[in-house]
Amino acid sequence: MGLFFSLLANLFKKCDDKPLPIESIFKLPSPIPKFPPGDGFATGVIDLGGLQVCQISTFNKIWSALEGGPDNKGATFYEPSSIPDGFFMLGCYSQPNNRPLFGWILAAKTVTNKSVSSHSSLAKPTDYSLIWSSESKKIKQEGGKCYVWLPTPPEGYKPVGYVVTNSPEKPSVEKIRCVQSEFADAIEVDRWIWGLDKKINTSNINMYETRPKDRGVNALSVSTGSFVVQNVGATADVSLVYCLKNTKNNLMAMPNLSQVEALIQAYSPVIYFHPDEAYFPSSVDWFFQNGALLYEKGKESEPSPIQPDGSNLPQGGSNDDLYWLDLPKDDSSKERVKKGDLAHSCAYFHIKPMFGATFTDIPLWVFYPFNGPARAKVGIFNVSLGKIGEHVGDWEHLTLRVSNFNGELKRVYFSEHSGGQMIDASDIEFENGNKPVAYASLHGHAFYSKPGLVLQGSGSIGIRNDASKGKMMMDTGIAPKVVAAEYLGPVVVEPMWLNYSRKWGPKISYDITNEIKKVRNVLPKLLRGPFDKFVRGLPNELLGEEGPTGPKMKNNWSGDERY
């Protein structure tokens, strides 16, 4: 028996000795491509209008917590290394230990610019305040004790990051720089980095990633890559540090069309469809050429065929239900068009600035003529929901987030049902070099980063989102179409259908009660009550056949993916 416990203890010790994910450095599977010549894209430095910034992704480790935070694996704090001559540290970097090291932090340099100010855009702090220390904390830690210092800025300047040390002595004021107030903007908390507990506990200290409060195509706020400390009992005090601001308000760091095409070829995702999928994507042109019809309110008996380029679609206006699209009238053509045509499918790319044009967001849209019926999981039972979930016209998208400093893919947004996720490149699957892999859910077509079942509901009852790697797939880099890049002006001509603001499918109310009754009748009596409660919570768009609006009508067209 003693030998058994000894072996068991050794087994647990080996598990404890297993390297943490953060001890490995993530790199994209293939090198970043060499881009065609341009202006400021992928040159390493971006001018914010008298303040030049560069992105640092090499670090010196300062301290690690070995417990608490996501997955109870702790977090590690770093300071940037290999900062170019003339540039200064703006703050330290932190990341949870549950994923490989893959981060960045901005460093800055003053540029003489009489049109901005007679004062330097950077200044040394006058002092420091100790924000948090691990000195009295009974936690597993590595690298001594941790001390987080907030720089005290001189008048007219703001701090945009902290100094982290393992000494109780205040850091030198030469260690970091504060930025002139006109280069600073408000932040908000983003993903949780670390806290003393396994889950976020507002009664204790918490560290979060930050993101600019003002985000979108026209927003000038610039993410710094730093973190924020939320003190014990604070409701959401993120006023201690700031992000940066692009006061120059230009788009010199954005890629030109040749560089955009290189980005698409390098990073265009590969989409896998479920083995049982029956409704595939097509191009918009194919949908129009194969009998799609335009309806007008009051003239329902006289639908119009749609021109291949969408030139007879009403332009502008709002989603006022005066017009809508539908499948062909005859049953044979209708069923054929419903199934789509993968061979004639393509992805539609929109190129837009993000974070003050220090990043490029590339949403790519995929069109399906038809969204199939939903399926539910009720306990151990899997049931079809009949017509519930069906609608004509289905737009789904992924978004690539690329650094304008070096052209590296940093994150990918997956438009999952009930809210998507922006996922680090270190946490996604790649194929054929640096092409992210996405999985389209069965019938509903939402994109997920991993195969498997995602249940849209609570407990053991919900809408099934099944994703799996079937034989059918779509390489979005084959025959891609850049349909919008407003900052490039007339270089990119938007197709007529992009400015069609009404629904891509009819609004039809069917007998929902009857559809639900059919499902309810096949369930054991024990599950009917929970099922009724689940149905009452279904979103309205799932309870009627109603086509969606097009890409340009979505909030993310001019905004950030996450609000």
Image (cartoon, helix red, strand yellow):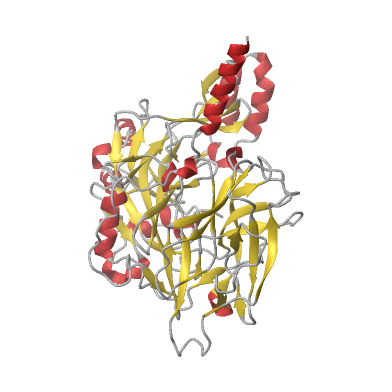
| Residue sitting nearer the eye, 330 or 14 | 14
Q: Is residue 323 above or below residue 540?
A: below
User: Where does the image place residue 474, in percent across and percent down from the top left?
Assistant: 29, 39
Q: Which quarter of the figure has residue 341?
A: top left
Relative to residue 198, is residue 343 drawn left or right? Answer: left
| Residue sitting nearer the eye, 67 or 514 | 67
Q: Is residue 492 above or below residue 283?
A: below
Decide if residue 224 is in sight here: yes
Relative to residue 10, is residue 317 drawn left or right? Answer: left
Report the quarter where the C terminus lies: bottom right
Residue shown at the point (63%, 59%) measured from the top left: 167
Relative to residue 52, is residue 482 drawn left or right? Answer: left
User: Where does the image place residue 285, in percent across and percent down from the top left?
Assistant: 27, 48
User: Where does the image place residue 194, in percent across and percent down from the top left?
Assistant: 62, 48
Report the quarter where the N terminus lies: top right
Q: Which quarter of the figure has residue 257?
A: bottom left
| Residue sitting nearer the eye, 363 or 187 | 187
Count of marks placed on residues: 0
Residue shown at the point (64%, 52%) measured from the top left: 145
Relative to residue 126, is residue 305 drawn left or right? Answer: left
Q: Is residue 253 above or below residue 523?
A: below
Residue shown at the point (44%, 42%) measured from the top left: 427
Q: Which quarter of the figure has residue 241?
A: bottom right
User: Where does the image place residue 399, in percent across and percent down from the top left?
Assistant: 41, 51
Decide if residue 328 is in sight here: no
Residue shown at the point (69%, 55%) measured from the top left: 133
